[in-house]
Image (tube, grey):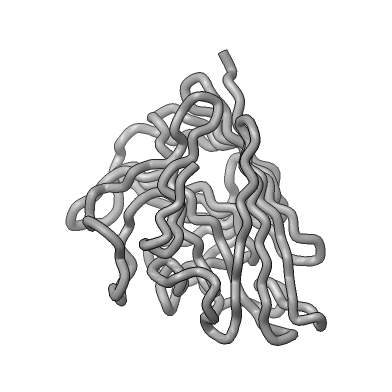
Amino acid sequence: MAVDLTDGGRWTSLRLAGREWLWAGPGLVDGPRTGLTTFVDAGGVDECFPTVRGTPDHGGLWNQRWGHPYDGAVLSRTFSCARDTVTVDYHLEAEPGYRFVWAAHALLDCMPGATITTDFSECRLYPDDGPWVASSWPTVTTYGPTDGTAVGAVLVDCPTVSVHDRDAELTMTLSCPGQPVSTALWRNQGGFPAEAPYRSLGVEPMLGKVFDLAEAAPDDAAVVPAAGELTWRLILSACRTT
């Protein structure tokens, strides 16, 4: 795998089971996004913290140096790589009671027909405007052909998600005992943005139950315990299916 330390620590490559899993982006920006005040999609994996949507959009780390205080908190991570598996251990230091939402905003290089398999207790669907709404969502989602649609959803109580594309499968598992663990999905089949739409597929392990921290009910966000520290682990593994 590869990480661009000059561009907010964005993951730029995740090569497992003999293939690249990360989408390279729509070419909206050239070089690091340092100094930008509005999020620009560059592909790969951006770490969203302390919110996903809202203010700041996609959080505040996507163009910041890691290991430095942000919003009164310090978030660090350690990567461990083995054959066809990457483990990421996160460590957050902040005041007890600090509330946040975090997501590994992974944009995947998948073809139409790829499927996303999940198991969850609740779906929170996000329309283009307005608050989220409770909705149904299939346990197996298909990344379809270009049809001019784009939709975001948070699947609550969903620690594991598997993506099957062509002849390989990628599985992501997030663990953080005592905290709300979800999976966010962004299925853009040529419906976003309106002025120049492109295709993108986001499969995003997350802590929290909502995209916007400002909209989080008491149980909707992760909370730093009395010790002032919180750790969580993300495991990504892949295998060939044919």
Name which residue lies at 37% across and 62% down: 6
How many dots with numbers? 0
Q: Residue at x 69, y 43 (%)?
A: 119
Outermost residue toward the top in this view = 242
- Out of 2 and 209, give the one closest to the viewer: 2
Q: Is residue 226 above or below residue 116?
A: below
Residue 170, x across and y down, in percent: 58, 34
Residue at horizontal 19 percent and vertical 53 percent from the top: 196
At a point 34% along the width and 32% down the height, the residue shown is: 145
Q: Position of residue 131 (x, y in %)?
A: 49, 71
> Which of 226 and 110 lies nearest the eye of the viewer?
226
Q: Quadrant of residue 56?
A: bottom left
Q: Is residue 31 left or right of residue 133?
A: left
Q: Answer with left or right where residue 192 lies relative to residue 161.
A: left
Image position, residue 100 (x, y; %):
61, 75
Across and down, in percent, residue 80 comes to 64, 46
Judged left or right of residue 13, residue 239 is right
- Between 76 and 48, the residue placed more toward the observer is 76
| Extreme residue in the left direction | 195
Report the quarter where the C terminus lies: top right
Q: Is residue 1 above or below residue 64?
A: above
Q: Is residue 203 left or right of residue 145?
A: right
Answer whether residue 107 is visible to the viewer in this image: yes
Instruction: Using the rendered image of the protein, determine whether residue 155 is visible from the camera's viewpoint.
Output: no
